Amino acid sequence: MSLDNDLNDLEQLLQEESDFNEIYKKFFSVVQNDDFISSGAPCSDNRIEEMLKRILLKIFDSTKLINIMIINIEKYGFYHGTVSVDALPGSFFYFKDISMGMLAVVKRRNDEISFIRFTGENISKGNFIVTTPSTATH
């Protein structure tokens, strides 16, 4: 399947699927696409970093150390990467055109994974709010 089709399918699934595990399965199938791997480049994006930090601070104690690495596939307005909170790993992906993404993070050391679907809404230039309409733990 082409990367165009893979990302379109993932974007649709992100918006419609209620089973967060299924969404993340699709994400992990997309990352196996050779074009996906070769198309991304590390980047810095303050808006995405701030959204992720706000979400993570709601889930974890605010004293935790948060590290974020972002990869951008510019052609698609698609971002993905890794997060760690006090050495607990996680990953995320985000579609800029719909301002929606998903975060998966190990919440406890017993391998429990929290999935968070989020939307960042602009409220004025340079300012936004983060809504987290749905979470699930598996």
Image (tube, rainbow, N blue to C red):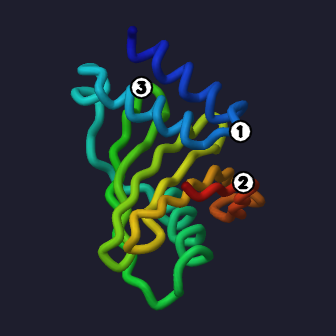
Say whether residue 98 is left or right of residue 27.
right
Contact (CB < 8 A) between labels 1 and 2?
A: yes
Q: CA distance from mark 1 to mark 2?
A: 9 Å
Q: Position of residue 41 (x, y in %)?
A: 27, 40
Give the structural element (helix, strand or loop) at label 3.
helix
Amino acid carrying label 3: it is Lys
Q: Looking at the image, which residue is at 48% across and 54% down?
A: 104
Question: Is label 3 or label 2 in front?
Answer: 2
Q: Looking at the image, which residue is at 45% across and 61% down?
A: 105
Contact (CB < 8 A) between labels 3 and 2?
A: no
| 104 vs 111, nearest the viewer | 111
Amino acid carrying label 2: it is Ser
Q: Position of residue 4 (x, y in %)?
A: 45, 15
Indicate whether 62 appears above or below 124: below
Disc 3 marks which residue? 75
Which label's residue is closer to the chain start, 3 or 2?
Answer: 3
Q: Residue furthest front?
A: 110
Which label's residue is closer to the chain start, 1 or 3?
Answer: 1
Q: CA distance from mark 1 to mark 3?
A: 28 Å
Give the structural element (helix, strand or loop) at label 1.
loop
Q: Position of residue 98 (x, y in %)?
A: 66, 37
Q: Looking at the image, which residue is at 39% across and 8% down?
A: 1
Q: Residue furthest top?
A: 1
Amino acid carrying label 1: it is Ser
Q: Looking at the image, which residue is at 40% across and 53% down?
A: 91
Mark count: 3
Mark 3 residue crowding within 10 angstroms, few (<14) / some (14–19) / many (20+): few
Disc 2 marks which residue? 134
Give the structural element (helix, strand or loop) at label 2.
strand
Indicate whether 12 appears above or below 119: above
Disc 1 marks which residue? 18
